[in-house]
Structures are given as C-alpha cells and as structure tokens.
Image (cartoon, rainbow, N blue to C red):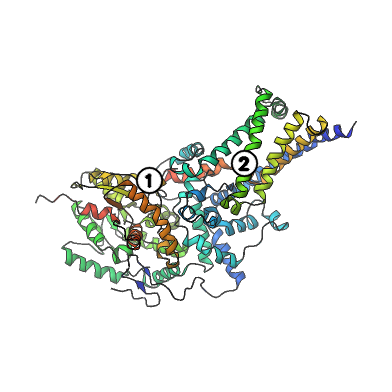
Amino acid sequence: MSTEADLLDFARGPALEAALVILVFGMFWRLVAVLALRRSRDLSEPRVRHAWLWGVRTIFTRMWPRREFRPRILHWEAVSYLFHFALAVVIVGLVPHILLIRDITGLSWPGLPTGVITFAAGVALISLLALLAHRATHPVLRRISNFDDYFSWLLVFAPLLTGLMAYYHLGGPYEDLLAVHMLSAELLLAWLPFSKLAHTVLFLFSRGVTGTIYSRRGAQT
Amino acid sequence: MTGTDTQFPLELNQPRLSIQKPEPRYDKQGEMADTERLDRAMRGFIKDFGATAALYMESCVHCGQCAEVCQYYVQTGDPRYTPIWKLEPFKQAYKREMGPFAPFFRLFHLKRRVTVQELEDWQDLIYDSCTQCGRCTMVCPMGIDIASLVGLARHGMAAAGLVPHELWATVERAKREGSPLGATPAVLKDRIAWLEDEHGVEIPLDRSQADVLMTISSIEVMKYPRSIVALARIMKRMGASWTFRSDGYEATNFSMFAGDQQGQREASLKLIEAAIAVGAKTLILPECGHAYQALRWQGANLYGKPLPFRVLQIAEYLAEGIRQGKLQLQPVQKSATFHDPCQIVRRGGATEAPREVLRALGVDLREMDAQGAYNWCCGGGGGVVTIHRADPLRYKTYQIKMQQVEDTGAEMLVSTCSNCRQTFDDGQAHFHWDKTAQSLLELVADHLVTEQE
C-alpha cells in the first residue's frame, strides 16, 4: 500500500473519529461548564408570562438587523450572510459530503450539481477573503480581534480551498489532496468547540436567554 | 439650601446636580496592596456571575457591530469605545479563572493575569463612556446583553475601590446622610412644608397607612420641586390614598451606578420596608430611569422574595388613571416628540405607557427616527452626567440626541426621567439650544381638567 493511501486511510478512519469525538465532547463540556453555573430565579413580577416562548422567537428575529441599525452595518452583514449561506451549500450540498454524513448518521438527502457547489465554494472563499481584509483594516475589528479570530478563519478557509483543489486535481495526486482536505476539515471540527466557531451552537442559547429576559419585562428584543 | 455634607459639597446652581468639580480627584479609593485590590475586583465581579453572564462571555464573535450603534464610538470613531472592549479585562479574567477551559489558559499562559493598572485604565470605559443604555444589546447578533455585563464589571470596580470620584462621593454621601445628592429626610420635610405653603396643595408625609407609597428622586427634590406639586395635584384628582415616607422616599440608587451592591440593596430595602409598613398596594417610582431598573426589575431579587406590592413608574400609573377614567386632561395644542429613557423603555419595557399619556393629552406626537427600544440615549445615564471629566465626551454624544429632536420638527420635547431631564438642561445651556426636555408628569398636572365644584 502506498503512503498516499495510508494518509487517506488515516484521514478517513482514526482522524475522523478523533475529530468527531473531540467535537462532541468539547462542545458538551463547554455548554455544561456554562449552563451548570448558578441560575437564580428572577423574583420580579413579570410583565409578560411564558417569556421563554418569546425568547425562542428572538433566536429568529435576531437573524437580521433592525431598520434603525442597518445603515451602518448592513453591508458587512450581507457579506457575512453570503459566506454563511455559501458555506452551508458546500457542506450539505456536495454528494460526497452527504455520503459521509449518511455513513455517520444514517441521514441522507439529494445533492446539488457540482457546478453549483464549485460556484458556492468560490463565493465562500471570496467572501472569506473580504471578511479577513475587513477584520485586518477596520479599527474596531483590529482592536477586538485575537488569535482565535484569525486561526478560526484559517481553519475555515483551508478545507474550502483544499476541497476545490482536490476536486479539480490541482497541485498534486488526488489521494493526497483528498487526504489533506479531510484532515483540514477534521482540524476545523476539533477546533470548533474551543473557539469562537462554537457560535454555531451558542447563538441559540445567548439569543434565547436575552430574548427571554427582555420579553419578561415586556421590552422589545 | 445646601446639603450638610461638607466633604463633597454639591453643585447646586448648575443645570445638572452633582458634587462640585473635585480638585484633586480621588478615582482610586482605600489603601491596599495591588494583589488585594485585584482580588477584590475579581471577587466582586464574579459574586453575581451566573450561567447567563458566562454564556455571554462565551458567545462574542468579535463582529464589532456593537460599536456601530454605540453613541461613544459613532461620535468619536475611537475603537476604545467598542462596547464589548469595555469588558476586556473582565473577559480576560473570566477566560483565565473560570471559563470552561480556564486550566488550559493558565497552563499554557494563553491569557495574562489582569493588572490593577489595566483596571485603572479601563475605569473611563466602564463608567465615563457607558450609560448602560443597552443599545448595543439590541444589535448584537449573538444577543449578548452587554449593558448587564458592564453592571457586573462595575461590581468588581466598586469592590476594588476603583470608582470615579463623583460616583464614589455620592455613594459616600448616601451612606452618611441618607441621600446621594442632599435630599436628606430633613431637607425633604422642609421642601414639602414650603411647597404646601407656596402652592396651596396637601402633600401627605409619613401617614401610617396608605394604598400608594410615593417615592421621589433627589434630583426632583433639589432641582425640580414642581414635580412634587404636580404629583400632589394629580394624586388628589385621582382620589388616591397616598403618602411619602421620610423613612423610604429616595428612589435614586447611585450605589447601583457605582456598582456598590450592598449600598444598592440597602437603598432598595428602605423603599420596600416603607411600602410594607404603610400597607401599600402600589409603590410608585418617580420620573427616574434607573430607579425603575433598580426596584422594578432588581428589587425583588435583592429582597430575596417577590414584593408584596406593585411597582409602577409614574407614567404607568398615569396611563392606568386615564384608562380608568380617573384623569381627564385638557388637550395640549402642540406637537411633541418623546425621548425614551433607556432604563424605562429599552431595558424596562414600559414603552407604551408614556405614549398613552401623550395621546390622552392630545399632542401631535412626532416620533424620532429611532425610538422606543432603539432610541439614542441622552448621554447622561449610568451616572455619567455626574462625572465632570466625562463632560466633553458627553456633549459629543448629546449632539446625536439634539439632531434627532430637531429632525422631528416637534415644538416640544417630553420625557419621563429627571436624570435625562437634567442632562437635557445641561446640554441646552452648553449648546445654547432653544429646547430642553419637559416632564411628562408636569405636563399632565398642568393640563388637568378644572374641577366642576
């Protein structure tokens, strides 16, 4: 067996398993460590009952900025949406991804044509580059950014790039490129729970909690 | 009339009520070693740190949107004023000391230990340039309530003796003489006797039983005494059984601004105990934003059980009176715009009540471009209006508000918070503006339908 095949086997086997285990346990630990902290009951008389229902609503309403805020933030919000949407198309639309997900979870759905996937991957890469340039030049973002922001960016960028390279056989033997692609994606999965990328899960909780607190007061969320 | 406190004399003849400009300033209180100060800061910070605050600390994605809606960043372009950056030392301490991965951060020295110098450097961000208005909370795509985190940071700063001079001094005054700004029980009694004489109204004080316990802001006692007369007229018209109590009248809570939790609790307990003592069914909070935050939403939690009476802001009480037909008003033949006090509306949820009252007054209400939960702060909340060194920055932020009001083309500006009101008075004097905020309460009192008897 060649070393390329060894590397690919490693990426498909133990590396994938390790990444998934780290992802699940890391995320579990992060959530438990936070949610298990003291939650004192709010004894004030609520203006609105069953406020948690409105908290759930906030998870959705906070997806798009309010009219009052749009002039200053909408352009970059749109780029960010473009990136998220394109990434989602690539992740859940590519047939090999669906096959992998089916192997792990048993769930499956029809894939999208590869032309669409390639286009989406291109959009995701370009929007990521734009967002990086924005982060590196805007005074506020420069001030508040740290290692996590740039490293997480890199780990999202890498699988997109290596995926395209593997698909179009650019820069090396297919098996090598595929192995590198898989390993980079696995690194991303393993990094996710420890980084800002955990917002993929945390947004449900933080939006929901604030939505509940404010709704209980009869305030807008 | 002056306060009895000579150590921190009040500035009584100015548009805003604060202590006189301190020379020298003492922005660092108490003598202690740096290690102890730091320890106190962190213990103060985490004392009330629960799942919600931790969740917020974990959730920031560094998108920077909070800066784009914050009056301090918008007006200066200085990234220091990014709301979440104001929490940076405490965020760092959280990640290092108590987050889910704290041991890793410590083991690999990924987060440095915060220093006292850093906390001192952050004082102007946590106090001078944050009114806790909560506008950033409304934009955050992760829903982080940054204003509440600033509140927790202030707990830490207060425990460590790192409070701006004026806020520290007002809390000292409150502890020494029962009122942060000179409205001691004796001063209140004097004022009430004088107002009764001058205006021919009855202002009940220290009745043993009443359905309604009325509270007051020391800003009103010292600067806007006509508000007390307005209250008396309205309460008489509504036929209410009510009283002030000299053992529980002060609705302001400067300890909450400063972050002194013990003081905040004591101030709230006075009101709660007075209300229970008179058997009140309702406690009315005056035109004061943070009083609403302190008692309506935090009062029961500091008391440790649900309050055995209702807590209403005066505009809510007026709206109720109008709904029940107890208040008939003459129309105000003018256009008006309403300034939403952040703690009553955005963070308090009483958005409709003041508008109901304005509608009953028949004003032509012209809302600002951003209003209700999305309003711009007057720039004086969170104790900021009392801090002298924050004045230049405050005037910058005030310009947003002035522009907003001008854009409506309304003849009158009405609000229902005396802290906003004094911020408007001060801004009016500074900019020689032709407008300032009027009190909704006084407007109602001035337009009661004359009695037919």
Reply above or below: B75 against A182: below
Of residues B332 and B291, which is closer to you in this image? B332
Circle 2 sits in a helix, a strand or a loop, which is it?
helix
Residue B253, picture quadrant: bottom left
Residue B187 is at least partly visible in this image: yes
* Residue B216 % position (x, y): 31, 61
**Quadrant including the C terminus of chain A:** top left
Dot 1 amino acid type = Gln
Of residues B434 and B225, which is closer to you in this image? B434
* Left or right: residue A8 compared with residue A49: right
Q: Which residue is mark 2?
A: A130
Circle 1 sits in a helix, a strand or a loop, which is it?
loop
Callout 2 crowding tier (Cα within 10 Å): few <14, some 14–19, many ≥20: some
Q: Which residue is mark 1?
A: B371
**Quadrant including the N terminus of chain A:** top right
Reply above or below: B377 against B163: above
* Residue A135 % position (x, y): 61, 47
Label 2: chain letter: A
The residue furthest left is B453
Tell me if label 2 and label 1 are in contact, CB under 8 Å: no
* Residue A41 % position (x, y): 48, 49
Callout 1 crowding tier (Cα within 10 Å): few <14, some 14–19, many ≥20: some
Residue A19, picture quadrant: top right
Measure how far apart labels 2 and 1 are at the Cα level. Answer: 33 Å
